């Protein structure tokens, strides 16, 4: 081997060790590797930075905007409520959850699907009396499997497709992977329905113990002609919120204090909830409820500009000793008070009659700029925004779903390439008002894009220096003469092992040149090997670290590491054997 190949392989092993052993973020590790290969002269600037212009990477960045538009409009929550329903058994609930999750993950980023489904599934599980720990990990696995069904379902597919385009001039169709992806989703779904309840314990959820957090009282009103009017409290999902509980209903001046689960909701009902700050954000995501306070409706802010903020009153707050009504708080700060907490407990009585005291904690609805504007003002001792608290604009959900459907249609019919359809869809989301330009910019996950783009440099160096050929020769020599099918299985197993230890996209990029070298050594078609890398890099079921969705459900489900091994290892074997068996029949050697 030339010295360049030796240095490249040492760099590869160093990157793998750093990702597995250290806590340094993946984007820093891979950018350091890119810089090292550039400085040592192993790669020129064009080769080292080619990943940042790869069509797959650009498509991923664009689809982040499309997914954000669906999230901002509450489109996924709307679909979830429509499809989840009211199953009577735990297995029925799992089946009802797996279908929409798998389908949605085929057409939008599966990380975004899981992020939006987690609160919906927690609420749904509590409403049905099912432990959320038996639904959240299957939710992650179903999103992973659903993402393999189409080219845009997961960033890994787009990354490998981008490398196929740039190196071999091969373009995969939007639904070409479905020949293997759909059987994997069906096989994996049946396994999860049959096994998850037996393997996953009941650990409850991450529901806050309300007496240990700041308590607020939040008042909302049932909208006329809204989707929850005429439903019971339980059917509307108000009986088992994660962060609060319904204490009373004000119906035309008549107070109902003993709120039964089968109490029917009527238009104009004012519902009073007690709970943690996140309770207000949770209620915002329920279509058919609106804030009861008139001051919130009068705020001079568009829907997408609103968020929830907590502030602690300081000694220079100008309205100390005055009531909320006398303070003219909304006029002074362009923010509406939702509730007041004092010494960790909600302050009883009507909101307008509460007298401010130093140290009171207020829950506000304000603009996104409020935190920056008042963070260093002496009016408040502390100003803190609540994450992800902008209320969805459900009126625009059909518009966002229409844009997504149009993107899929023009791509599937071949009228436009995926990258072109994604650009049009992202632009349509902004122009139609489903998402603002500023929020579209913030929706792009730059660290993920840096990981993908910079890992291309390492893959290119493996190919250019002959390091990939050396590894392929070593594998073929170690395991003896291999048939193409056995070589395919070996590539799949190595990729699956990599993806459990490092990021799925990095595993795909690093294994791509090795798989290419193996196919060339055997003199067979490379496409089955590339597809095997796609599926294996996504098939991360054994650890919470291999795939982002696995990590996202780790906390809410109160899982332990062995929960992933017990449920995920058999699933990994089942998915792997099915994929290896099907791929050569769809893409011949």
Image (cartoon, rainbow, N blue to C red):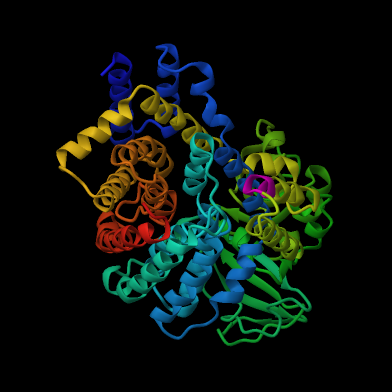
Q: Is residue 80 visible?
A: yes
Q: Is residue 420 magenta?
A: yes
Camera-side residue: 22 or 311?
22
Q: Does residue 570 sit above or below 507 in this rendering?
A: below
Q: Residue at x 41, y 71 (%)?
A: 186
User: Which residue is pictured at 45% across the width and 27% down the height?
Assistant: 457
Q: Please report the residue visible at 28 percent of the width from the left and 44 percent of the height from the top.
A: 494
Q: Report the magenta stretch's main SS.
A: helix
Can residue 314 be spotted in the picture? no
Residue situated in front as seen by the camera: 379 or 195: 195
Locate residue 90, reporting x and y percent.
39, 79
Give x and y (percent) for residue 65. Answer: 65, 47
Q: Is residue 524 left or right of residue 562?
A: right
Residue 434 versus residue 460 in the image, above or below: below
Q: Where residue 290 sits in the image (x, y, percent)?
A: 73, 67
Name the residue rendered at 44%, 53% in the picture: 549
Q: Position of residue 176 (x, y in %)?
A: 51, 58
Asked if the magenta segment contains residue 135, the reply would be no
* Span highlighted in magenta in the image: 417-422
Q: Quadrant of the N terminus?
A: top left
Horizontal placement of 299 versus 363: left or right? right
């Amino acid at each position: 081997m030339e010295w360049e190949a030796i240095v490249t392989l040492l760099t590869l092993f160093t990157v793998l060790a750093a990702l597995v052993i250290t806590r340094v973020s993946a984007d820093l590790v891979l950018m350091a590797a890119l810089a090292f290969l550039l400085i040592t002269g192993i790669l020129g600037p064009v080769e080292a930075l080619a990943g940042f212009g790869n069509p797959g990477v650009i498509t991923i960045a664009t689809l982040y905007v499309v997914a954000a538009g669906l999230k901002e409009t509450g489109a996924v929550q709307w679909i979830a409520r429509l499809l989840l329903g009211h199953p009577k058994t735990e297995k029925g609930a799992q089946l009802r959850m797996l279908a929409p999750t798998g389908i949605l993950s085929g057409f939008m980023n599966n990380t975004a699907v899981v992020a939006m489904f987690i609160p919906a599934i927690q609420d749904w599980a509590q409403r049905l009396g099912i432990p959320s720990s038996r639904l959240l990990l299957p939710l992650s696995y179903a999103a992973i499997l659903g993402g393999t069904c189409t080219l845009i379902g997961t960033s890994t597919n787009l990354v490998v497709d981008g490398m196929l385009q740039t190196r071999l001039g091969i373009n995969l169709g939007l639904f070409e992977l479905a020949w293997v992806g759909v059987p994997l989703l069906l096989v994996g779904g049946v396994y999860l329905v049959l096994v998850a309840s037996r393997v996953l314990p009941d650990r409850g959820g991450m529901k806050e113990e309300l007496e240990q957090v700041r308590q607020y009282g939040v008042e909302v009103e049932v909208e006329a002609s809204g989707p929850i009017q005429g439903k019971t409290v339980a059917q509307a999902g108000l009986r088992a919120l994660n962060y609060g509980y319904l204490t009373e209903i004000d119906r035309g001046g008549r107070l109902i204090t003993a709120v039964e689960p089968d109490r029917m909701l009527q238009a104009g009902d004012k519902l009073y909830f007690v709970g943690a700050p996140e309770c207000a954000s949770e209620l915002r995501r329920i279509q058919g409820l609106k804030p009861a306070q008139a001051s919130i409706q009068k705020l001079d802010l568009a829907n997408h500009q609103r968020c929830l903020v907590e502030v602690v009153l300081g000694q220079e707050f100008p309205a100390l000793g005055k009531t909320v009504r006398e303070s003219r708080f909304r006029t002074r700060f362009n923010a509406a008070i939702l509730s007041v907490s004092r010494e960790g407990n909600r302050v009883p009585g009507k909101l307008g009659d509460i007298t401010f005291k130093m140290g009171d904690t207020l829950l506000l609805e304000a603009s996104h700029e409020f935190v920056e504007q008042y963070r260093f003002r002496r009016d408040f001792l502390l100003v803190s925004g609540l994450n992800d608290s902008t209320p969805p604009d459900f009126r625009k959900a059909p518009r966002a779903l229409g844009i997504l459907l149009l993107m899929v249609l023009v791509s599937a019919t071949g009228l436009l390439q995926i990258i072109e359809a994604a650009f049009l869809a992202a632009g349509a989301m902004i122009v139609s008002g489903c998402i603002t330009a500023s929020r579209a910019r913030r929706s792009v996950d730059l660290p993920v894009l840096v990981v993908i783009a910079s890992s291309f440099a390492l893959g290119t160096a493996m190919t250019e220096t002959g390091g990939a050929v050396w590894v392929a020769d070593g594998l073929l020599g170690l395991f003896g003469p291999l048939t193409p099918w056995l070589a395919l299985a070996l590539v799949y197993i190595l990729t699956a092992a990599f993806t459990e230890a490092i990021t799925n996209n990095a595993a795909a990029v690093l294994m791509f040149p090795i798989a290419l070298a193996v196919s060339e050594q055997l003199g067979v078609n490379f496409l089955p090997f590339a597809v095997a890398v796609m599926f294996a890099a996504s098939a991360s079921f054994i650890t919470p670290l291999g795939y982002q969705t696995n990590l996202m459900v780790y906390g809410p489900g109160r899982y332990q590491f062995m929960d992933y091994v017990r449920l995920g290892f058999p699933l990994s074997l089942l998915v792997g054997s099915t994929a290896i068996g099907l791929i050569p029949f769809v893409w011949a050697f």
